Image (spheres, rainbow, N blue to C red):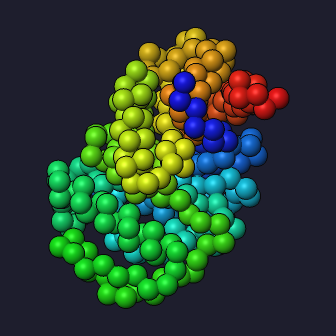
Amino acid sequence: MTDYGHPLSFGLSLDPAADALGETRRLAHQADIGGLDYLAVQDHPYQPGHLETWTLLSHLSASTQRISFLTDVADLQLRPPALLAKAAASLDVLTGGRVQLGVGGGAFPEAIASMGSLPRRGAQMVAFTEESLDLMHQALAGGAVRMQTSHHTVMGYRAGPVPATPVQLWLGAQKSKMLAMAGRAADGWISPLNIYVPPEEVPARQVIIDEAATAAGRDPRSVRRIYNVIGTIGTHGAPHGLVGDVEVWVDTLTDWALRLGFDTFIFWPVGDAETQLELFAARVVPAVRAHVAERRGQR
């Protein structure tokens, strides 16, 4: 069992496609009133059909009341870290504390280069990303921010405003070096979709994170664990990701929380998104919360 004991949270992945904006707005409103915790948006600005992520999140924040927002994940090679931290802090202040920041090293170097940024690969990308996390933690804390390396030159930028509730930095990672970075330098790990990192591969990745956290003098339980879950709630869905009725979803997410250690699940619905969201928010989420609380002895 690998239950790190964090309260559970649940979110919905929103399509950033410009031609899906009407549905995206409806889903955001539905998730907000339905009690979900997060609206998550992927970040691939080199896709011509995609709206820019921060612009979309800002737009949606104005029409929602309580739900928080998550970049899933922001490409650090396209977004200067100090400025990205400024954007996150600004939106957090404007929304009254409704922002968490998922970031990644940048998975598509050619696409990054197509937008005019320097593409980094391998060890260079890993070093750049870890320094970026350090810069962003400095910037989100406020005060003078300094770093001069081969990747970054920040000469005393004075950061602010400082959010009343800290914005966390959650790192998207799949391979061992990035997973270890999540353990020693990030506030959480965002796993890729369950079709890319299937459940049977999760325990080995959690071990890498835990060992790196311990080696860095951190309690592994301080690192949040977020799983992107694609699938269909129902027995007639396409065989893509997690497919099954409400009971299957409840049992599976309960298991993934208590045995695999995830505390947050971001739902990527396949099929009729509004119907899928209704089932997820009204029937799956409350039951998973209840099952986990019971197993933890909290009821």
Look at the image and tell me whether residue 256 can be seen. Answer: no
Q: Which of 232 and 201 is in front in this view?
A: 201
Residue 72: image location, x then y, percent: 45, 49
Q: In screen coordinates, is 92 left or right of 124?
A: right
In the image, residue 10 above or below residue 229 = below
Q: Taking the image as drawn, is residue 291 in sight?
A: yes
Number of numbered callouts drawn: 0
Residue 232 in picture, x, y percent from top left: 54, 22
Quarter of image, res 162: bottom right
187 vs 157, left or right, is right
Q: Which residue is drawn at 57% across and 14% down?
A: 244
Residue situated furthest top in the rendering? 235
- 194 lies above or below 98: above
Task: Name the residue at 52% across, 17% down.
Answer: 243
Question: Up-down: is 240 above or below 235?
Answer: below
Residue 269 percent location from the top left of the image: 54, 31
Q: Which residue is drawn at the image coordinates 28% and 40% (left, top)?
A: 176
Quadrant in which the C terminus appears = top right
Q: Residue 128, percent across and down?
A: 25, 63
* 120 left or right of 168 in image: left
> Which residue lies at the image location 59% right of the left edge and 49% below the top edge?
39
Furthest residue in direction right, as rendered: 299
Q: Give the camera-side residue of 290 and 59.
A: 290
Q: Quadrant of residue 10 in the image? A: top right
Quarter of the image with the N terminus in it: top right
